[in-house]
Image (cartoon, rainbow, N blue to C red):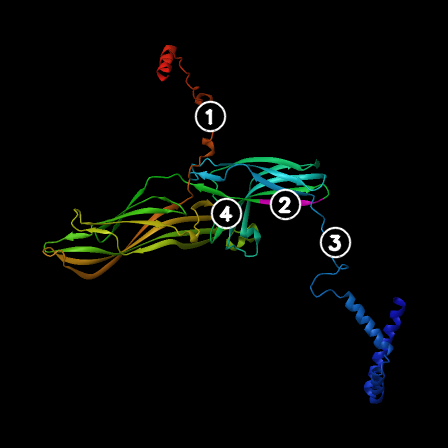
Amino acid sequence: MPSRRLPFARSSHSDEKEGKDASKSGIESHSHSDATASGHRHPSTAALDFLHLGSKEKRPSSSGKPSSQSSFPPTPPKTMELTISMESPPCVFYGDAARSSGALLSGQLRLGLTQPTVTVSHVSLSLVSRASTKHPVQKDCLDCISQRTVLKSWSFVVENRVLSGDGETFPFSHLLPGSLPATASSSLGSIEYSLEARAATAWGDHIEFAHSLRVSRALWPVPEKQSLRVFPPTNIAANIIVTPHIHPIGEFLVQFRLNGVSERGKDVATRWRLRKLNWRIDEHLKMISQPCPKHAHKVGGERKGVLHEDMRSLGGEDIKAGWKTDYETPGGGQIELEFPASIKSERKPTCDVSNGAGLEVSHALMIELVVSEEHVKNKAPRQAVPTGVARVLRCHILLVVTERSGLGVSWDEEQPPMYDMVPRSPPGYSETVTDLSELNDLEQLGT
């Protein structure tokens, strides 16, 4: 109580003075210790104990949880919530960026209420694309890291409206143009799409919700591509047959043939023997980091950026046997080989991107051959003598990594049947006349 704390404070002050005096006189300090040992406590000591107990009662617990007196006021419950339900199939661009007709996007934005009646002042939805870089011009600038572009926006509520019951549903739809880049994620940057919804009440409560959207691209299957590579100063030529479109999952077949591996002389023939073949699939990444208007001076002005490049291997193998060699084939002999190639799934490849707002992804098949030269006498073709000369031949073939098209159909081809497409009705049944006398004869025979 306040009337008792003031004397205690004075007593403690006086006790400090007595302690100082006791330090000067050993007799007085000895008499004070005897009095404490005999059970008679000094009033100043009792005051300190009382204050110490009071401080323990107000001290917060060691567990770190605040006491009831220092706890924050509870947050008010949300009056509404936003959810998005998609009605359209996954967004897939069929064909390349120049020929694709796009993809249809449709769904419903639901505004749920947690109270019987809520006055809503604003409800909107935006389709947003973000191009982010992992090497921005200014590291701590969010505008340099990510560039946000609004592709489409819907405003469902622009003035105060009273909603009751379970809430209200707002449908939306949009045609994504086929020229947009697909969703991509790489070591240099990424491209993402999302639906961002916002709602506000009349008394200032705001709520936001984001729904990620995956956009992919699938190219139609095309015939196999035949490539010819010549390796001067030798007469060796490589003929490679491979499909130009490959997929992140699955194998594809590579047909390889070497021509001109033998050259006959008068007495000695020169041959090239294949020792090893190595193939690998490389992924090339390019990212142009564009600055925001605030930091454009660091790269020399606006509409300029910094180019970053990276390359990694998605799969490969060394082949040291399995080919067929025939030096007697007309035209200088030939070596034939057929092998399967694929992308390792754990490498998580990125599909090709050519118009990705600064991000460019491409792939290539690299083939390296190690051939050695040897001389053979025409009279003894089985006795080959190595000359010690070896060469490394390299081939570079461009590939396109894309998603599988499957049985999907573009939106412009998904149209309901027209009246002329309805087939005719089922054919009618012809009338037949049965002679009952024949049935009676059969019954008599059965009896």
In the image, is 16 to the left or to the right of 201?
right
Specify the amino acid type for callout 4.
Ile
Query: What distance separates the C-alpha of mark 1 from that of mark 3?
Result: 63 Å
Q: Which residue is mark 2?
A: 208
Mark 1 in CB contact with mark 3 (< 8 angstroms): no
Mark 3 in CB contact with mark 4 (< 8 angstroms): no
Specify the amino acid type for callout 2.
Glu
Query: What distance separates the C-alpha of mark 3 from that of mark 2?
Result: 23 Å
The vertical placement of 136 against 205, above or below, is below
Q: Which residue is mark 4?
A: 191
Dot 3 crowding, Cα within 10 Å, few <14, some 14–19, many 20+: few
Specify the amino acid type for callout 3.
Pro
Return the disc, 4 or 2, that comes first in the chain's sequence: 4
Write down the region rendered in magenta.
204-210
Q: Please name the residue shown 54% across and 52% down the image.
A: 145
Return the disc, 3 or 2, that comes first in the chain's sequence: 3
